[in-house]
Image (cartoon, rainbow, N blue to C red):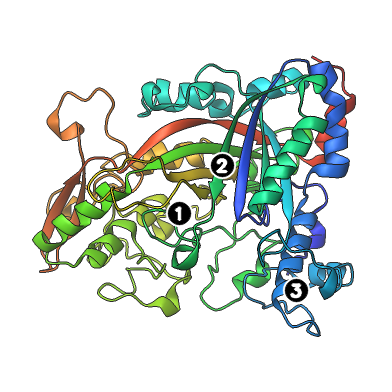
Amino acid sequence: MRSTSDFDLHNIQGDIWPGLSKKYQQFFFFNIENPAAFKPMLKVLADKVITSSHGALVNRAIIHKAKAPPSSRLNVAGAGLNLARDVLTAIHDTLPPHREIRKARGSDLVSITGVNISFTKRGMDKLSKEKFRDDPFLQGMFEDMVGEGRDEAKDWIPEFTDGSVDGVLLVCGTELEVKEKVKELAQKYLGKNQGIRHILTLDGIERSGDAKGHEHFGFLDGISQPLIKGLDDETAEKPGARKYLTRPGVILFGHDGEMDNEPQLMHPPWAKDGSIYVFRKLRQFVPEFDRFLEQEAPRLNFNKEQLGARILGRWKSGAPVQLHPNVDCKADARLNDFDYPLDDQFNCPFASHMRKTKPRGIVENRDKFDIMRRGIPYGLEVGPDEKEKTKLDRGLMFTCYQTSLSNGFQFIKNRWVDPDTFPADKTKFTGGMNPGQDPIVGQSVKGAIEEDDKVLNMSIYDGDGKHNKITFEPFIQSNGGDYFFAPSLKLLRDLAVAPAV
């Protein structure tokens, strides 16, 4: 078994792996007006502010320790603490005593903040002469998703349409502490005196109570995550965990698996330990989604929960509908060690969200298209005056990491999610219909003329075991975003002393 010692955990930004702890998150988008004034700040940020993978692991361990009895030692199998033994050994004795673990104001939560930073292609051009090889990253999300995709420019936040966003600072933790941290960092490192102009701040917040960990449609989120070879090996050994490990180069530049190890496609050494970061604000139409389930389920001889499970591919608890087609099984809420039959959609439709975005065994190269999702919900809960129609803005700040957009986010969106023909050659198993579009994040054809293109559809077995079809308008709306590069801490320090472009 490989050890985490094969990776420099002090060089990788912590949100890439293992992920920053986030009850609350602010995305601070900025423009670099004076690169020469800003560049020296990159070393200061790398040395004093940015949370590395090691720092993120320490934060997780502190949270876990705060929940445990004062006399206990950290348990490698502890709930939610996916640390390799060598990491636990290294950090255990550096943790503060129980009595010194600081709590967030007005809360029993541990007071912790994590900070990461990323730059668009435009931002990197202001900081470095190095060139990227990922075409969608070079285009930017607006050209990719609006110019060539299904996003509507009118739905985008204006700040994402004019090319002024050069970078984003991620600050995660507990709400009051995050807001104070953003204010402090903006004054010290990301203000006018440092050549920075603030563009926009967006907030995400974890839902509370029984909805904790669930996105606004009500489903448990973040389950089918890739496990990185050499970092998550022990996690993969746990019961129910995914057993297929993702090559680290699919997520991190400069490691095994990047672009299938084809040298002419890989990035140069300067990009090592970095990753491409996708930010995309997705508004969710929750009342409309709930009403659709209530109205459509009886026609298909399902109850609302059964239809919802088939549309997503998992029950709201997280249990896979492929293994539990009729009744939820909360004991299997995070089960990820299963596969789909290649030529059958009786339990789980081919076009369900989980099967569209992670088709598992149908793909020969099992990890090539993996992405590391790090999203967080935003907005208030559905109010009593929203039973029929959405009035308030709520949804998901969708984010993910990968080393190739054309194999990762862009591929999944354009080749799997939106086409009704994926997976291919399945009409004899669907009663002659195409499988359909992803019912959770699918988008209709922009400027559609044909009536069939103005709506989405999905092939499904109904409750009587017969082929059927559901038709619906999109339940999400893209409000825009961009593609960013999350550099290593070493590269941040190198950029600080490189000549301004």
Q: Which residue is mark 2?
A: 203
Residue shown at 70% from the left, 61% from the top: 231
**232 over 11 or under it: above or below:** below
Q: Nearer the viewer, residue 90 or 281?
A: 281
Q: Which residue is mark 3?
A: 65
Identity, as a three-letter code, of the amino acid under mark 1? Glu
**367 over 153 or under it: above or below:** below
| CB-based contact (under 8 Å), mark 1 and mark 3 | no
Residue shown at 38% from the left, 59% from the top: 218
Q: Nearer the viewer, residue 378 or 439?
A: 378
| CB-based contact (under 8 Å), mark 2 and mark 1 | no
Q: In what element is the residue under mark 1?
A: loop
The x and y percentages for residue 350 are 28, 55
Q: CA distance from mark 2 to mark 1?
A: 38 Å
Query: Upstream in the sequence, badge 1 or badge 3?
Result: 3
Query: Upstream in the sequence, badge 2 or badge 3?
Result: 3
Q: CA distance from mark 1 to mark 3?
A: 41 Å
Identity, as a three-letter code, of the amino acid under mark 3? Lys
Q: In what element is the residue under mark 3?
A: helix
